[in-house]
């Protein structure tokens, strides 16, 4: 279900212009509709006060980024921009949810009844074995910022049939709804329900398999997207602001961001990214979707382009869930690097034709009934679903090791991931497509890897605007008729990483950042030409570790893609 949403414009109301006798005075010039903006200053209070001083209307107070959302006419904006004192004005952009209808036929299993359908993916990623060990997300709270959830017991109740929804905050209306009695605005769109079910559904099949990755985790629901799957920066940021303020009250450890917007500026200069960075800084593991604008390079969306957080791309099981030998990267999964040169996504997870819970009257189900079983299950594809799988895995990790910081969680997730292997001598997906590889829940939970991602960067200084960072990616232009650019990595000394370019070690620059300088800027238009994907049959198998020597040959002189296109789903 690929949708793109655009800001609504205010209608001009024109009344009674019939053939009336009018004075000879000229009609007044039409007034332009106010523009929705985000005003950033030294504090949210100062931003609101400045808006009011020029006659604007404050719509949101966004303390987490020292801002206020407001409605300003063009004249008011000019007056505000003329005020001295470090004011920054951003457009209040729209954000879109990153899921689309699955290919390959009608969703099955529910049969129009309450029958529990097998979803396969907890087993695919090793979570079923953890559930048997008692690691099921107990005591860990996941916040899902999305379109809400519907009243299904698989969502509302945990694996021991007690209410798991600790709070339901409506960021659109700025109202804390009643989570204890389960009275809240239901998910009219359907996306939030589907995403939440991937992460935490407690529905259990006859053979004992849970539908969700962390079926006993607690849930905080932040309703920020409307019945059409659309939201604004201001509503999403207000939701994150509320989550950070109430982190300790509800024990929030994870924030699932299954949505994306096209980048409008550098990562540090985007107000939504600033809110996400603030959440990471206070100890919340932020998991965000890469976006569905692949397979082209440099298509990672906001907030997935934040270097600190965990960004997730999508792979697909090729409609053969019991055969991992034909798993491939999903064609829609956005690829890195980011404009600032960071490797993204960090990991990939299942994102093709994912079966999850959705009310059959939700807007997505009404728009795409061919993918709904008529009962409770819907098939969707997208990096949204991949993101939810990783959020569930993080809940399992934090139940087992609650002392882990977000940087340590990210390190273990990447260290335990499995990059796609060689097949028949052909090269594998690039690091900019798959990151560290396919996540593995079992290995991530029982990992003893000791390290911290983002170690060379200071999120405090970044948020203060003192210093910003660039990643280790660089590019050179291909010669010849095919043209385009090839991306590669450089080490801390500036040398191209060649044979050991995919190795994970404490010294590796995969997730380190270097101080930003103006001279780093790339020119516009970096492209991967058509056909950069590889041949069928790449296998994410057990035991394939970074230290085993996954090698690229002569990375700075050979293209990272072939000329053959492959079907992804």
Image (cartoon, rainbow, N blue to C red):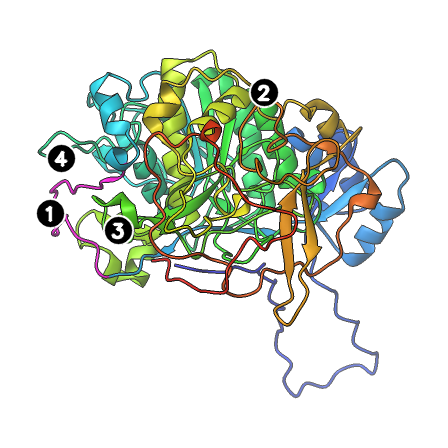
What is the C-alpha distance between the residues marked 3 and 1? 13 Å
Q: Residue at x 30, y 41 (%)?
A: 150
In the picture of the structure, the residue carrying the numbered disc 2 is: 282
In the picture of the structure, the residue carrying the numbered disc 1 is: 113
**In terms of sequence position, does the residue under pointer 2 or pointer 3 come before the other?**
2
Left or right of residue 85, residue 11 in this image = left
Q: Is residue 222 magenta?
A: no
What is the C-alpha distance between the residues marked 2 and 3? 35 Å
Q: Which mark is residue 80?
A: none
**Helix, strand or loop at mark 1:** loop
Q: Position of residue 337 (x, y in %)?
A: 61, 46
**In terms of sequence position, does the residue under pointer 1 or pointer 2 come before the other?**
1
Left or right of residue 467, residue 273 in this image = left
* Mark 4 nearby-residue class (10 Å; few <14, some 14–19, many ≥20): some
What is the C-alpha distance between the residues marked 1 and 2? 43 Å
Q: Is residue 417 above or below residue 216?
A: below
Q: Position of residue 371 (x, y in %)?
A: 25, 58
**Helix, strand or loop at mark 4:** loop
What is the C-alpha distance between the residues marked 4 and 2? 38 Å
Q: Is residue 112 magenta?
A: yes
Q: Residue at x 32, y 25 (%)?
A: 442
Q: Are marks 4 and 3 in contact (CB under 8 Å)?
A: no
Left or right of residue 23, residue 425 in this image = left
Q: Nearer the viewer, mark 4 or mark 2?
A: 4
Q: Which region of the structure is painted magenta? A: 105-121
**In terms of sequence position, does the residue under pointer 4 or pointer 3 come before the other?**
4
In the picture of the structure, the residue carrying the numbered disc 3 is: 378
Q: Position of residue 198 (x, y in %)?
A: 31, 38
Q: Nearer the viewer, residue 373 or 125?
A: 125
What is the C-alpha distance between the residues marked 4 and 1? 14 Å
């Amino acid at each position: 279900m690929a949708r793109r949403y655009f800001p609504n414009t205010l209608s001009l109301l024109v009344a009674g212009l019939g053939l009336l006798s009018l004075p000879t005075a000229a009609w007044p010039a039409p007034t332009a509709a106010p523009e929705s903006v985000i005003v950033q200053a030294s504090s949210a209070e100062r931003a609101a006060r400045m808006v009011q001083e020029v006659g604007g209307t404050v719509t949101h107070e966004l303390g987490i980024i020292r801002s206020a959302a407001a409605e300003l006419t063009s004249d008011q904006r000019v007056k505000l921009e003329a005020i001295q004192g470090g004011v920054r004005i951003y457009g209040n952009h729209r954000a879109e949810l990153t899921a689309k209808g699955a290919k390959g036929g009608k969703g099955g299993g529910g049969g129009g009844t309450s029958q529990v359908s097998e979803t396969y993916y907890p087993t695919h990623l090793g979570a079923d074995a953890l559930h048997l060990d008692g690691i099921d997300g107990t005591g860990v709270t996941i916040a899902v910022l999305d379109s809400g959830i519907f009243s299904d017991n698989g969502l509302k109740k945990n694996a021991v049939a007690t209410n798991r929804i600790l709070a339901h905050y409506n960021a659109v209306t700025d109202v804390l709804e009643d989570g204890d009695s389960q009275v809240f605005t239901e998910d009219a769109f359907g996306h939030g329900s589907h995403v939440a079910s991937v992460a935490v559904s407690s529905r259990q099949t006859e053979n004992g398999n849970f539908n969700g990755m962390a079926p006993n985790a607690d849930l905080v629901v932040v309703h920020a997207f409307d019945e059409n799957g659309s939201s604004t920066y201001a509503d999403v940021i207000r939701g994150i602001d509320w989550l950070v303020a109430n982190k300790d009250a509800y024990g929030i450890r994870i924030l699932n961001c299954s949505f994306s917007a096209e980048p409008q500026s550098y990562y540090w200069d985007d107000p939504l990214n600033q809110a996400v960075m603030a959440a990471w800084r206070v100890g919340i593991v932020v998991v965000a979707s890469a976006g569905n604008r692949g397979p082209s390079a440099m298509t990672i969306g906001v907030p997935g382009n934040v270097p600190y957080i965990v960004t997730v791309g999508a792979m697909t099981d090729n409609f053969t869930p019991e055969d991992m030998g034909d798993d491939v990267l999903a064609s829609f999964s956005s690829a890195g690097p980011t404009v600032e040169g960071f490797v993204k996504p960090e990991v990939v997870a299942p994102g093709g034709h994912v079966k999850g819970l959705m009310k059959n009257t939700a807007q997505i189900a009404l728009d795409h009934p061919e993918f709904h079983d008529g009962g409770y299950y819907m098939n969707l594809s997208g990096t949204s679903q991949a993101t939810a799988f990783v959020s569930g895995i993080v809940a399992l990790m934090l139940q087992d090791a609650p002392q882990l910081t977000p940087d340590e969680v990210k390190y273990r997730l990447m260290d335990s991931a499995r990059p796609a292997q060689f097949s028949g001598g052909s090269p594998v997906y690039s690091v900019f497509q798959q990151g560290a590889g396919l996540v593995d829940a079992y290995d991530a939970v029982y990992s003893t890897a000791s390290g911290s991602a983002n170690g060379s960067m200071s999120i405090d200084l970044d948020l203060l605007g003192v210093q910003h960072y660039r990643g280790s990616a660089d590019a050179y232009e291909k010669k010849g008729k095919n043209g385009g650019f090839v991306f590669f990595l450089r080490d801390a000394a500036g040398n191209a990483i060649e044979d050991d370019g995919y190795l994970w070690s404490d010294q590796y620059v995969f997730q380190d950042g270097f101080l930003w300088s103006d001279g780093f800027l790339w020119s516009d238009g970096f492209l991967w030409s058509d056909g950069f994907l590889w041949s069928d049959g790449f296998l994410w198998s057990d035991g394939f570790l970074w230290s085993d020597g996954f090698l690229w040959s002569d990375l700075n002189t050979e293209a990272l893609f072939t000329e053959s296109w492959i079907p992804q789903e």
